Image (cartoon, rainbow, N blue to C red):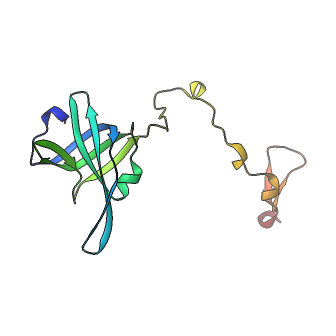
Amino acid sequence: MQVKDLQARQGKVEIVLEIAEKGEVREFEKFGKKGKVCSCKAKDDTGNIILSLWNEQVDKIKVGDKVKVTNGYVGEWQGEKQLSTGKFGTLEVLEAEDEPVYTNVPPEQRPEADLGSEIPQMKDFPNLDVDELSDDVVKDEEYIG
């Protein structure tokens, strides 16, 4: 499905969009519960549409993200179509702008990860001992006696 095909009052919408702009986050209270809502400009190759983000979606989605709406609903406000996940739909981030996805890139062409200080050191594993005969063999004294 594409933006150009969407009609007001249409349900069961499944579409992939890119978040082009993210509006101001508004907080509200309804039936004693607090929530958040934000309107975004989302696009595909055929056009733009307003995408409403609710609650946890507001913090999850960033400009540049590619998202998939499943079981969405198209409403209309002041003559403009608006897409929402509503009560029964879902919104999934397919690709985040700041986290590139290397699907068809051979491993040797991928950039190296900077693991920094997250690599555990041998001192972090007091029960492990490297066998003197081979650097490849590690035994756990607790289980091998």
- The image position of residue 82, as x and y in percent, is 18, 45
Inspect this view and state whether residue 94 appears: yes
* Vertical comparison of 46 with 16: above or below: above
In this picture, is 13 found above or below 34?
above
Q: What residue do we see at 19% from left, 35% from top?
A: 3
**Image quadrant where one finds the N terminus:** top left
Q: Residue 61: image x %, image y %? A: 38, 47
Image quadrant in which you'd find residue 15: top left
**From where the camera sits, is residue 2 visible?**
no
Nearer-the-camera pick, 78 or 137? 78
Q: Residue furthest top?
A: 109
Asked if residue 42 is positioned above or below residue 24 in the image, the reply reads: above
Q: Is residue 2 left or right of residue 142?
A: left
| Whole-percent x, y for residue 115 in the image | 67, 42
Left or right? Give the position of 95 relative to 52: right
Picture residue at 15% right of the left edge, 32% below the top: 4
**Left or right: where 17 falls relative to 124:** left
- Residue 18, quarter of the rendered image: top left
Question: Of all residues shown, which one is farthest toward the bottom?
Answer: 32
The residue lying toward the viewer, choosing from 62 and 70, is 62
Residue closest to the eye, 83 or 135: 83
Q: Nearer the viewer, residue 109 or 129?
A: 109
